[in-house]
């Protein structure tokens, strides 16, 4: 007779999933003429205000045109229940040439991406492009 016992199942802890904020892009779909100055925002929604993995993260925007924007903050050491994460990241960029650009937002902690968002931008030819 074989030993037919049910397989043990383990569920991942839900606390981490419940407290983790989500990253979402904000703003209208962008269709502009070159040169196009755009302002983009990424926000952290929900989750705990003191979510350690997102505390004092570095920000990187990849613009899809071969350029990046990076910033980092100088923060006090993390304290559970006291330290608050930043929830809104806004930046501007100028696209000098026409094209379809996939803009990527990365929130990083210790050079590891912990939150990401993607935004598409369409830049049409402008007056200086002979249009």
Image (cartoon, rainbow, N blue to C red):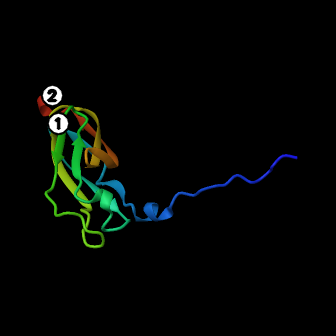
Q: Answer yes or no: do the residues labelled 1 and 2 have beta carbons within 8 Å?
A: yes
Q: Residue at x 22, y 49 (%)?
A: 59
**Residue 88, placed above or below residue 115:** below
Left-right relation of 68 to 9: left
**Residue 119, placed above or below residue 80:** above
Q: Is residue 37 visible?
A: no
Spot occupied by residue 79 in the image (x, y as percentages of width and height): 25, 68
Q: Secondary structure at mark 1?
A: loop
Q: Secondary structure at mark 2?
A: helix
Residue at the top extreme, as displayed: 130
Spot occupied by residue 92 in the image (x, y as percentages of width and height): 16, 48
Q: Which residue is mark 2?
A: 129
Q: Is residue 100 visible?
A: yes
Quarter holding residue 63: top left
Q: Earlier in the sequence, mark 1 or mark 2?
A: 1
Q: Which residue is mark 1?
A: 34
Compare residues 6 and 40 and report the one nearer the observer.
6
Distance, label 1 to label 2, CA atoms, is 8 Å
Residue 3 disc label: none
Q: Residues within 10 Å of mark 1 (few under 14, many from 20)?
A: many
């Amino acid at each position: 007779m074989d030993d037919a016992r049910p397989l043990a199942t383990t569920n991942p802890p839900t606390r981490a999933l419940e407290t983790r904020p989500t990253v979402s892009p904000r703003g209208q779909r962008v269709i502009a003429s070159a040169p196009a100055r755009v302002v983009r925002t990424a926000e952290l929604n929900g989750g705990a205000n003191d979510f350690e993995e997102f505390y004092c993260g570095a920000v990187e925007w990849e613009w899809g045109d071969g350029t990046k924007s990076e910033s980092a903050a100088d923060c006090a050491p993390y304290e559970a229940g006291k330290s608050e994460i930043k929830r809104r990241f806004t930046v501007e960029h100028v696209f000098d040439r026409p094209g379809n650009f996939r803009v990527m937002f990365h929130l990083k902690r210790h050079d590891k991406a912990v939150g990401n968002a993607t935004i598409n931008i369409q830049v049409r030819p402008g007056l200086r492009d002979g249009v």
